[in-house]
Every structure is written in structure tokens, then in C-alpha cells.
Amino acid sequence: AFERAIPCEERDIDRLTQLVVTYRLRLSGTCSHPTAIAGRSLAKVIEKQLKKLELMEHARPKRSEFSVASVYNFTVTPTATTSCSFDHGMCGWVQLENVDFMDWTRLNGATPSGSTGPNNDHTLNSNNGYYLYIEASSPASPGEFADIMSPPLITATNSSIAEIIIRGIIGKDYEGDIAIDDVFISSLENSCYSVNSEVYTGSQSTTTSGLTCQSWGSQSPHSHSYNPLKYPYSNLVFNRCRNPGGSRQRPWCYTTSSSTVWEYCNVPLCSAPAVTTPAYPLGGKYPMALVNVDGQPGNVGRLVVYHNGEWGTTCNRDIFDHEIGLFCAQAGFAQRGQVYTGLIISGTGNTWLDGYYLSCPTTANSFYNCTVRVWGSICSHNSDLWLQCLPKLCPTCTSPPGGLNSTFGYLQLSNPSRTGVICSSTWDLKSADVACRQMGYLGAYSSRPSVLGVPSTQPAVINQINCYGFESIIDECTLRTTTTNCSSSNIATISCIQAPPPDSSNSNGGCSFYTGLCGWRNTGNATWTWHPDSTRHFDPFADSDYYSFIYVYQQRFSSSKINAVLISPKIFNRRLSTQFVRFRFRATGSSFSSFQVSFATDHAEYSIYTQHNIGETSGWEYRYTSNFKPSDDFY
């Protein structure tokens, strides 16, 4: 008999897992018991078991069936704002292809895998509404991502044009589908306005004829239906000139004169840039990039090239070493590299370049000197070219390296008398963490990555280094300097973790510190240090290798007074609603005199939580501040 739900005890799951692996079965239905997983998708439970056994395949084909083409349309007239609920289409947003691993799917109702995503959209909260999502289940793998790009937008501040890219990254758990809905993006208009824009937030409060504006919260002398809940993006505060919902051409207000209902305000028009079709939309001829799973070294990946409005891959056929160097340089790396044969994920869409149709003189110093006889290829994506390029190396350890791809290489140090490398058998991940932070990164992936192009011998500056891992600079570690040379096999190499861009949509300012500091910044005389959820980094609690958090550390018996301050990005408070802060807190020792949480607007600062004479906690504890109601955006 056919059963929709079956037992999922440990012995049952073990038997089913063996059947799935042996016969490559596809399962449907749910678990009937035990209670903890009753009702859960049987396929999801088996998938989790397979991941535990490390039997999941690594090469994942792109599996979304989304039909929107990955084409950049640079002839679309830019706007000051874009708002999309996805209920009636994509509103000009486009999928990117070959520079990511999957597409966003437009969907109504619940996601196909139960209890892993929303049941309805956010706008209508019904089956009639749509949203975008990406599926975290197989065949997706942790680190893979999907990109979607906005229509062109005018940035009022400097009169330029920009596109916004939203990236969803698959995490470690299959239960975490990612969904987006009700996307609203606007320029920040404080001193000028864009035509039909609703986001002017300046302080003008008189009309063109000099009349004082009526407060939006008042119904006298003129009644109206405009309120902050109905127009959350229009910042309807006090009696400021606004254009709620973009209902009129420019900012206006009701007046305090009983004889004049409303008038426009004397706010200047933002100077918009000329809209032309650039010769090279992405800044240059033949843009190239390396694409890999998020979190992997940036100098390794599938080579993609932008042509005819789309990204496409490269066929690994008749490709010569000097051409690989030109590819690497075009993608922003040093002019040297090699074919990569490690983890490979197939591309989709066009294959633009084929070595059979490519001619690059051996004397060429740029890909611009090459001739592409034919764009396109008959190669399948199983033949996509993957490269490992030599990064642009860090010139000194006393300042951040230049360029986005300088996270991987060997260290060069400078002091007044000598420039050279670290040549130490004690070089480890804790020392690499300190060096990476000194160069402006979050920390280190690895202290011994394999690096191309390391010279056979180099002058050495340090021949022994021992760091605990909490230090701010390597000068605080135990060092021994030298004037000898170092062979390539002993030169310290490093791979650093680059902080992701800060979240510019801080509606509530939340951060789990899973991938970094989320745009929060350090001030004060001590630094909040990021601890990733992996082993071999310095752990102030000696039991938190698999947790991500930030910490301040003071050495035992230290008499210096530390003051560590962490400031959030600006948090947008369009609805002027009541707020509170919740956080997890842990402390060891008894050397901290107080812990304080405050919020601040551009005009004042207020304390909302203070704890004095901090003692050791029993573990991670939840703390809550008192409620507060900012009168503006705040930190």
C-alpha cells in the first residue's frame, strides 16, 4: 500500500539512505515520527543525512528554469527610484547569467520544499501575490549564489547612474531558502528633487509664495488622507515639503492658509546626467571576470567575458600560456596564471570565446591586441575554461593592498632598513589572522595557500613569529628579525578574507556576524575582532570554534584602560516607530567596568542600556535594552 508518511527513526533513515545511494531514488512524502521531525519532507531528511555522510555530488548544474534573459539594457531611461512587488512582472530587474550559479525564481504561494521558505508573498500575503526566491536544497551547494540587477538609477548626490545588484548566497543548511519582495530603492534627496520622485527628505517648509506648510499629522485647516503608514517611503514628518507617492511633479505641501489648499515648494531640480549609450558599457572593451563559489579565493574561477549584452564562458580549446596571462590581466590579476582543474561547476548560456577562433600575438601585452575571428563556440559547458591567476601581491604589510583581488599571495614587509618576507616555521593561521587584519581584511582563510610565482629566493625580514591571534598588528607578536635570505619553500604565504560590502538597507540593523561586521565600524582605542565559525583561530572562550561573533580581548594583568566602541550603519526609520536592541553577550574575567548601548541621531545621543562591574557570565546570554523612539534615522 502507498503511504504518504512513514517512520523516520535512525534505523529507518539509514536503510533509506542506502537505497537512495544504490538505486539513485527520488523520494516524496513526509515523516510520521519521531515527533521532532513529524511532517518534515522525507527528501529533505535524506538529503541532510547524505550531506553528513559527504556523499553529495560537488558539481552542480544550474537548475532554475527562469526565462528572463541575462541582458544589460543600457538604453533604458534612468529613474530616481525603483519599486517592485513582482506581482506584475520584474519591473525592469534582470537576471545575471554565467557570473552567478543560478537564477531567482518568481513564485506565488509556498516554496516547493515545505517549511523552508515563505508560504505567501509579503505584499498581499496570499496566493495572488508573487515574490522571488532561490532554493537552498540540492542541487544547490553552500557558497553558490544568484544575482539580479536593478534598472539604471540616478544617484542625486553626484548626478551619476548606477545599477544595484542583489545577491542571495546559499548557506550551510538546506532549510534556508532565500526570498525577496517589495524592493524599494531610491537616491537620497536632501537638497534637490527628481521629477515625480517621492523621496525628497529636505527641511524646506515654505511654499513658492512664502506660505508656511501645514503639518502632515494635522487635519487643519485642510483635511487629507496622507499618512506615514500609507506612504512609508515619503518621510511625512512635521510640516516639511514632500511628494507622497510621487503624486505630483515635485515637492509640495498643504498650506496653513485657509484660502490656499496646497502649493509647490521652492526646491531645485536635481541635475540629471546625460543619458547616452556608452561605447563600452562596463568600462572597457572585452570585460572579463573569474567566477567561483562565494567564499573561495577570488583568483580562482570560471573565466567569463562580456559580449553583446551578456556574459558568456570560454571554451578550453587551443588556449596557450601567453593567452592565459592576458585573460588574467584582463580580469584584474597579474599577467600570469594556469588552467585550474579542481572543483568545477558548469556554466550556462552562451560560450563566447573559443581558443580555436582566437589569435593573440606572443608579443601582446593586453587582450585588446588579440583578434576574435568568431564569437561563439560549439563546445559544451563541460569544456568551460577555469583559471588560477597570480594575484597582484601585497607590496607592504603596513598598508592595505591595492585592488579587489590582492587577498592571496606571499607577504612582503618593509622597515626603514630592509624590505623582505617572513621566513618562519612557526607561521600559522593565528599569525596570518593578525597580518590580514593589519592590511584591512577581516582575517585569514589560510596561512599556507599554494601561490604561483613565488621567487626562488627573497630577502627575509622575520625568521620567527608567534602570535596569539588577538593582536592588532604583527609588531605586537613575538618576533625575531633577520638579514638572511629565504628560499621559496619557506616563504610565508597568505589568503585573506575580504569583508562583504556593508548592507545599505538597514531597516533594523540586525547582524549575526556570520560573514563579517555587516558595515559596523570600530572606534575607540581597542578593536572589536571578528571570529569566524571555523577552527584554529584565536578563541577567547576556548570553546567557540564553530561560532561566529565579535570580541574585545584584554590580556591578563594588563593595566591599560581600553575603550572599545562599535557603531552601526545608519538605520533608516521611515515610520518613526518604537525600537529596541536585542543582543547576545558573554564575558570572562572581571576586568571590564561597564557595558553601554546607546542610540544617536545626527543631533543627539541617548543611553538605553548600561551594565556596571561586569563579571563572568555562564555562557552566551540574551540582553534587551529599554524601548526607544528615535525622531529620525539613527545609529
Image (spheres, grey):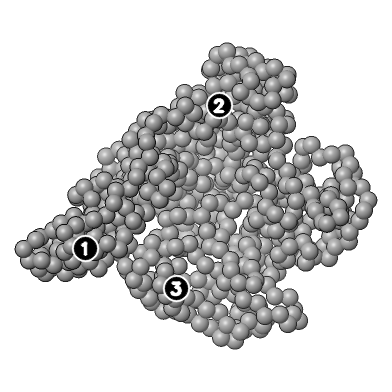
Residue at 39% across, 31% down: 276
**Vertical placement of 168 versus 607: above or below?**
above
Residue 548 in percent (x, y) is at: 60, 61
**Viewer-side residue, 316 vs 273:** 273
Residue at 27% across, 57% down: 234
Quadrant showing the N terminus: top left
Q: Is label 1 in contact with label 2 (beta carbons under 8 Å)?
A: no
Q: Earlier in the sequence, mark 1 or mark 2?
A: 1
Identity, as a three-letter code, of the amino acid under mark 3: Phe
Identity, as a three-letter code, of the amino acid under mark 1: Thr
Residue picked out by circle 3:
599
Report the residue that reaches farthest toward the front.
209
Residue 26 in percent (x, y) is at: 49, 37
Q: Few, some or many C-alpha atoms within 10 Å of disc 3 (few <14, some 14-19, many ≥20)?
A: some
Q: Secondary structure at mark 3?
A: strand
Identity, as a three-letter code, of the amino acid under mark 2: Tyr
Report the residue that reaches farthest toward the right.
484
**Vertical placement of 468 versus 63: above or below?**
below
Q: Secondary structure at mark 2?
A: loop
Residue picked out by circle 1:
206
Q: Earlier in the sequence, mark 3 or mark 2?
A: 2
Q: Nearer the viewer, mark 1 or mark 3?
A: 1
Would you say residue 240 is visible in this rendering? yes
Q: Few, some or many C-alpha atoms within 10 Å of disc 1 (few <14, some 14-19, many ≥20)?
A: many
Q: Earlier in the sequence, mark 1 or mark 3?
A: 1
User: In the displayed structure, does residue 628 sit left or right of residue 401?
Assistant: left
Residue picked out by circle 2:
286
